[in-house]
Image (tube, grey):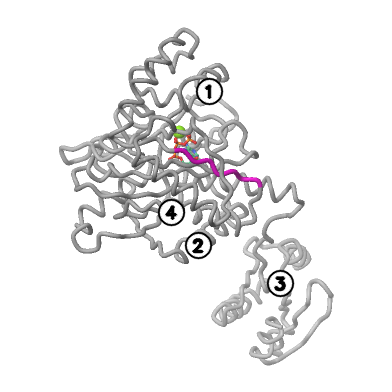
């Protein structure tokens, strides 16, 4: 039993509410993203929030952190288990296959924006319901597309005015060259087994590439001393990576190669990339992506190349807020009402309510008091919420049918009998 002072039911661990003030910036991020995605020919797909569990196990991989311990999985009335989506690449590919788009419109560019669910240990910046926006270009092995997706992400950040981000790229090879490098890495890392953290010791056998991703200092040092993948990928992967790097240079997109960059999801092949931001601390990735040429075949389809990214919306928002504050920008102005209606005496309230509805019908944003405040307190409210005008309605105004508009900033008052005229004044 909760014996604390606050006995209200709280949101479950790792869940966050978004209040109107925060939503303004959220909306800005989403609308800029939508515009930029569509400008580059990506169109929105909306898939359900839960899927057959097998979809994620087969694509993300049994030994990934997500599948091992982070999925919300439960039974429903069917025989199969269902899982709240921890990411949205596999669901989009599931839809692509289910509707047999590979037969009718093989090459497709999708984007999505929505909630994802992972039962992570709640720690700084980690939520159990978080949001991602992402793109997926399906049906091609062209390295130019890898670069296109990176550019789409940076265009979004540039337009939002986010400065200081860093683009990191790497190649993790393909099913031909990866196993060889996996064995080599295992062999080399085994020599340092005692020095690796406990988790990485377990990763050695289960999923050795994850060791490269460990954030612990000692593990990082060891990883920097072992062979790097760049010299061990096959010529096909080499060529692909060379084209990616050259194309990034052609379009003047600044990047660094990070040979320890691996992603936590098993489906990636060849190119992987991340966008990081220094405002984020240790977990500094705000956007992550890469090529996943085996995913579609892993879930039962034909071999089809694809590439895409997922950007964390909460992470992008934090990075953006921090840079904007640093540059002393206050972010977006709060939503401002055109009019606040002030009624004097309770008998004028029904008149006020009719006027309110007529104004709203004409597209004027307007509100009134619902808390039985005094006229003085209503005026203070008009001021506090930053309404452009106050319209004061007393019995005299009702009788004479006049509308008295007070400009809140200048204090100037205008009288009119004509509602159309009032609307014109408000819109000026
Ligand atoms: P990370 O290494 O940051 O945990 P990941 O490899 O687990 O990422 P991705 O799906 O590639 O998972 O993540 C893309 C981005 O989505 C992350 O960089 C981050 O901004 C955001 N993200 C992932 N998990 C969470 C979470 N639990 N809460 C908030 N944001 C998240
Ligand atoms: Mg993670």
Residue at image location 19% in from the left, 48% down from the top: 302
Q: What residue did someone put label 2 on?
A: 36
Left or right, 175 with reference to 383:
left
| Of 329 and 293, the residue lying toward us | 293
Left or right, 148 with reference to 29:
left
Q: Please say if the residues under marks 3 and 2 sit with CB atoms less than 8 Å apart.
A: no
Quick one: label 3, few (<14), some, or many (20+) residues within 10 Å? many
Discs 3/2, front = 2
Left or right, 144 with reference to 224:
left
Residue 9 visible in rendering:
no
Question: Mark 3 or mark 1: which comes first in sequence?
Answer: 1
Residue at image location 63% in from the left, 51% down from the top: 162
The x, y position of residue 4, in whole percent, is 57, 26
Discs 2/1, front = 1
The x, y position of residue 32, in whole percent, is 54, 61
Q: What residue did someone put label 4 on?
A: 113
Q: Please say if the residues under marks 2 and 1 sit with CB atoms less than 8 Å apart.
A: no
Decide if ligand 1 comes within 8 Å of the CB at mark 1. Answer: no
Q: Label 3, label 2: how many angstroms apart (C-alpha)?
A: 43 Å
Question: Mark 4 or mark 3: which comes first in sequence?
Answer: 4
Q: What residue did someone put label 3 on?
A: 342
Q: Label 4, label 1: how many angstroms apart (C-alpha)?
A: 36 Å
Quick one: label 2, few (<14), some, or many (20+) residues within 10 Å? some
Q: Which portion, as a residue range, is magenta?
A: 164-170
Question: Mark 3 or mark 2: which comes first in sequence?
Answer: 2
**Disc assigned to residue 224:** 1
């Amino acid at each position: 039993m909760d014996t604390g002072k606050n006995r209200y039911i709280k949101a479950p661990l790792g869940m966050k509410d978004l209040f109107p003030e925060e939503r303004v910036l959220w909306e800005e991020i989403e609308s800029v993203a939508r515009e930029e995605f569509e400008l580059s020919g990506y169109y929105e797909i909306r898939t359900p929030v839960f899927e057959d569990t097998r979809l994620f196990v087969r694509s993300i991989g049994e030994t990934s952190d997500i599948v091992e311990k982070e999925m919300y999985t439960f039974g429903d009335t069917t025989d199969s288990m269902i899982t709240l989506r921890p990411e949205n690449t596999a669901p989009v590919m599931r839809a692509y296959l289910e509707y047999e788009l590979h037969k009718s419109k093989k090459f497709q560019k999708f984007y999505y924006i929505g909630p994802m669910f992972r039962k992570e240990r709640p720690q700084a910046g980690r939520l159990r319901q978080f949001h991602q926006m992402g793109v997926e270009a399906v049906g091609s092995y062209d390295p130019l597309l890898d670069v296109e997706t990176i550019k789409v992400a940076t265009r979004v950040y540039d337009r939002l005015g986010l400065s200081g981000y860093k683009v990191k790229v790497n190649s993790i090879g393909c099913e031909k060259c990866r196993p060889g490098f996996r064995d080599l890495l295992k062999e080399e890392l085994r020599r340092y087994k005692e020095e690796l953290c406990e988790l990485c010791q377990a990763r050695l056998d289960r999923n050795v590439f994850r060791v490269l991703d460990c954030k612990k200092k000692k593990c990082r040092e060891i990883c920097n001393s072992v062979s790097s993948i760049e010299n061990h990928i096959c010529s096909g992967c080499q060529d692909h990576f060379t084209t990616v790097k050259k194309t990034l240079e052609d379009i003047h997109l600044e990047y660094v190669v990070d040979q320890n960059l691996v992603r936590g999801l098993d489906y990636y092949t060849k190119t992987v990339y991340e966008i990081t931001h220094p405002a984020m601390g240790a977990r500094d990735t705000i956007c992550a992506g890469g090529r996943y040429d085996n995913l579609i075949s892993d879930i039962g389809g034909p071999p089809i190349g694809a590439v895409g990214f997922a950007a964390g919306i909460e992470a992008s928002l934090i990075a953006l807020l921090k840079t904007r504050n640093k540059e002393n920008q206050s972010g977006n102005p709060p939503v401002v009402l055109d009019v606040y209606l002030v009624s004097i005496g309770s008998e004028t309230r029904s008149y006020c309510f009719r006027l309110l509805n007529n104004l709203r019908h004409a597209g004027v944003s307007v509100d009134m008091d619902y808390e039985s405040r005094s006229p003085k307190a209503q005026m203070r409210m008009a001021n506090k919420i930053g309404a452009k005008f106050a319209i004061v309605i007393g019995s005299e105004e009702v009788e004479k049918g006049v509308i008295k508009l007070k400009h809140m900033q200048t204090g100037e008052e205008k009288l009119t009998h004509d509602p159309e005229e009032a609307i014109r004044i408000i819109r000026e």
